[in-house]
Image (cartoon, helix red, strand yellow):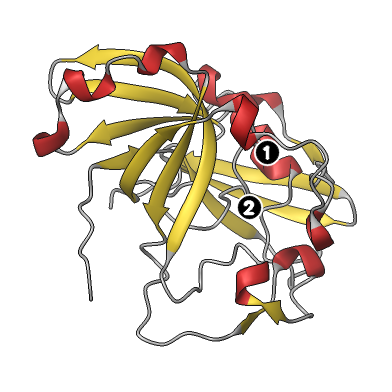
Amino acid sequence: MEHTMQVIARIRSDFPTKFGIPRQAGLVPALRAQVIFEPDYRNDDALRGLEGFSHLWLIWEFSEAVRKSWSPTVRPPRLGGNERIGVFASRSPFRPNPIGLSCVKLEELRRTANDGTVLIVSGADLMDGTPIYDIKPYLPYADAHPEAVGGFAQAAPKAVLKVRCLPELLEQIPQGRREALLGVLAHDPRPSYQDDPDRVYGMEFAGYDVRFRVDGTELTVCEIVQAAAH
């Protein structure tokens, strides 16, 4: 028996493409995003009591990874992209059902003229426009397990790169997004299998093309320019 889920909302974030998105939610707390409800679900009664929670679970679709077939094994970036493990032992987007799960911090419920009440969240790891199927409150007594064992990903990945960016370049980014950009770069947005110190990488963020090189543990921002309109 098949069941069709309804898209209740979409994310509005600073990432128009997959490149550069943190590999897990919460790695870059300075990132801000908006949860915009679809017209049929813009009902404030559905949000009654939500302001009492600090964190939320977002259940969403890996919309760029929808496939007709699936593989029982994947190669997680955390293992360098070289070792295969079972898909159900991973958070890979390439799954039988391309469902994502992210815990984000609820910063604000904001009433807007055009979109109704919008959820302002931080730490989201979703591409702009990602469809959201459900939102649930995070319950500390049930959802937090400090004693849990995390397999090959026991410890949170640390920012591994030292970011060098000239002030005149960084000033092109809106002030409220600069910390988030530096955090994303410090976590190394490159694919795990790429390590060419001469290559210039490009990442679109908040309407800007950010171009950079990585040599060892140092990332140097080469250029920041206005992104072309999509």
Tag 2–tag 1 contact (CB < 8 Å): yes
**Amino acid type, label 2:** Arg
Vertical placement of residue 81 versus 26, above or below? below
Q: Name the side, left or right, on which 144 lies relative to 53.
A: right
The Cα–Cα distance between marks 2 and 1, rounded to whole angstroms, is 8 Å
x and y percent of residue 56 in the render? 47, 31
Badge 1 density bin: few <14, some 14–19, many ≥20, Cα 10 Å: some
Residue at screen point 41% across, 35% down:
136
x and y percent of residue 176 in the render? 52, 18
Give the numbered dot on residue 23.
2
Give the numbered dot on residue 2.
none
Element carrying mark 2:
loop
Residue at screen point 69% across, 24% down:
167
**Amino acid type, label 1:** Leu
Residue under pointer 1:
27
Element carrying mark 1:
loop
For the question of whether residue 210 can be seen, the reply is yes
Give the camera-side residue of 122 and 188: 122
x and y percent of residue 160 in the render? 84, 46
Q: Name the side, left or right, on which 82 lies relative to 65.
A: right
Q: Residue furthest right?
A: 216
